[in-house]
Image (cartoon, rainbow, N blue to C red):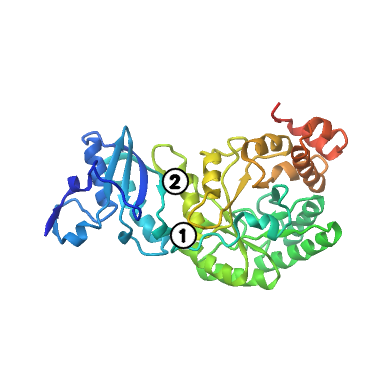
């Protein structure tokens, strides 16, 4: 038997092994607590310790987490893989982002980053498609794919919603997308919206000769989401969309399994993420949320606009790089840039984020002076001018839709 107390979870000489999950935290200790004391408590409470010292078997002690690094307010903790149930994101997060977020021993604590060992990663499916959706669905490897959300966010009838989709698709947009709070309300029923929108999709494909698709929001309780995914597949849809944080990680894992059976890609909306990641000193970073999502198997996820749009963002570039990085053979994830974008921003956005992304524009399409169809054309024209290395103002002289957009919203092109 050995004893385990808070101080036993701190060992600055410990060298993590290749099967440890390494987590990096920002910590502000409580006023009566040293950093070392707080660091030991975080490791203890997130693994197998408690406030009272215990006598345990050596086997149990070997499953304890260890704080092995303290640099200013940054601590790093190694978690043995045996702490975790295979392929269970909820169980992992109950450890590394659970009760420790409310501990009195810390005034602030933030999960900043994780380094995932192969032994844990191999139990998760990862994305079914990832960025390959650009080729497999749209044959658009040479450019970013595009999406738009009908505005207003909710309130449109099924017919109005589908009509806006048709105008956007025929203007050059690849994807119609539901907003995060549109599911199955009385004014726009889910099944009717699927049928009508996909009917307009087929019409747009026939007219344009381009592949089009629809990101329909299946978010609900788990059973409902699985039923909705089956309905989308029956109607020849290619995608489903899930509000992954409000729906929950367990539900997402169930949807991922179903979508593999059905051959559907998953678009992940991050609604509610800022409840966890907005404060620099507390919560869970968007970088970590994106990691959880990739392991669970989303194909594309909103990661921000590098502070060019309307929403507060973290390190969009770093997050996107991680989503594309090698992770023991797991497919990558296609980043989605969205929130306050318009044609005049897109050259700078692409200069910063590159072309292997999905660009979602809402108000910057539907608010165009000449309507949704013209706004969609302006977005494609802005992208085309950038890919061709053309000055957007010069390009706009021969493209009236783009010119009208630039006149309204301005030009943020890098010079």
Nearer to us in this view, 157 or 257: 257
The x and y percentages for residue 353 are 62, 40
Any mark on residue 276, and which? 2
Q: Tell me the mark number nearer the camera, choosing from 1 and 2.
A: 1
The N terminus lies in quadrant? bottom left
Residue 118 shows up from this direction: yes
The quadrant in which residue 75 appears is top left
The x and y percentages for residue 280 are 43, 37
Mark 1 vs 2, N-terminal side: 1
Element type where label 2 sits in the image: helix
Residue 151 shows up from this direction: no
The reply to whether callout 1 and callout 2 are in contact (CB within 8 Å) is no
The x and y percentages for residue 311 are 57, 39
In the drawing, does residue 372 fall left or right of residue 337?
right
- Which residue corresponds to the image point at 66% horizontal and 68% vertical from the top-left? 232
Q: CA distance from mark 1 to mark 2?
A: 14 Å
**Is disc 1 surrounded by few (<14), some (14 to 19) or many (20+) residues within 10 Å?**
some
The C terminus lies in quadrant? top right
Element type where label 1 sits in the image: helix
- Which residue corresponds to the image point at 81% horizontal and 38% vertical from the top-left? 402
In the drawing, does residue 177 fall left or right of residue 14?
right
Nearer to us in this view, 53 or 122: 122
The quadrant in which residue 158 appears is bottom right
The x and y percentages for residue 278 are 47, 40
Residue 2 vs 406, above or below: the answer is below
Any mark on residue 249, and which? 1
Residue 373 vs 280, above or below: the answer is below
Extreme residue in the top direction: 415
Nearer to us in this view, 302 or 366: 302
């Amino acid at each position: 038997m050995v004893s385990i107390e808070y101080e036993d979870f701190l060992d600055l000489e410990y060298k993590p092994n290749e099967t440890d999950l390494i987590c990096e935290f920002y910590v502000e200790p409580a006023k009566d607590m040293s950093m070392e004391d707080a660091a030991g408590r975080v490791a203890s409470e997130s693994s197998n310790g408690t406030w009272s010292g215990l006598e345990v078997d050596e086997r149990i002690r070997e499953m304890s987490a260890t704080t092995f690094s303290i640099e200013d307010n940054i601590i790093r903790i190694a978690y043995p893989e045996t702490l975790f149930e295979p392929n269970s994101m909820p169980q992992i997060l109950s450890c590394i982002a659970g009760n420790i977020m409310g501990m009195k021993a810390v005034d602030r604590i933030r999960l900043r980053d994780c380094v995932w060992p192969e032994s844990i990663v191999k139990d998760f499916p990862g994305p079914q498609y990832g960025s390959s959706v650009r080729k497999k669905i749209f044959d658009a490897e040479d450019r970013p794919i595009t999406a738009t959300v009908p505005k207003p966010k909710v309130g449109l009838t099924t017919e109005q919603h589908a009509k806006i989709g048709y105008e956007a698709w025929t203007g050059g947009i690849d994807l119609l997308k539901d907003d995060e709070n549109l599911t199955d309300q009385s004014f726009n029923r889910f099944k009717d919206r699927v049928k009508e929108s996909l009917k307009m999709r087929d019409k747009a494909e026939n007219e344009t000769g381009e592949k089009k698709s629809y990101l329909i929001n299946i978010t609900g309780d788990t059973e409902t989401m699985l039923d909705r995914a089956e309905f989308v597949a029956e109607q020849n849809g290619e995608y489903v969309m899930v509000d992954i944080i409000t729906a929950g990680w367990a539900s997402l894992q169930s949807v991922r399994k179903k979508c593999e059976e059905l051959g559907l890609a998953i678009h992940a909306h991050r609604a509610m993420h800022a409840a966890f990641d907005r404060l620099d000193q507390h919560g869970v970073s968007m970088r970590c949320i994106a990691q959880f999502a990739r392991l669970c198997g989303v194909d594309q996820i909103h990661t921000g606009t590098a502070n060019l749009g309307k929403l507060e963002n973290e390190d969009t570039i770093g997050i996107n790089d991680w989503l594309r990085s090698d992770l023991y053979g797991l497919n990558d994830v296609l980043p989605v840039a969205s929130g306050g974008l318009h044609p005049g921003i897109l050259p700078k956005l692409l200069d910063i984020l590159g072309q292997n992304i999905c660009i979602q524009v809402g108000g910057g399409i539907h608010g165009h002076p000449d309507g949704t169809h013209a706004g969609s054309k302006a977005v494609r024209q802005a992208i085309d001018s950038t890919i061709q290395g053309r000055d957007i103002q010069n390009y706009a002289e021969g493209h009236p839709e783009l010119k009208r957009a630039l006149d309204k919203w301005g030009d943020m092109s890098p010079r």
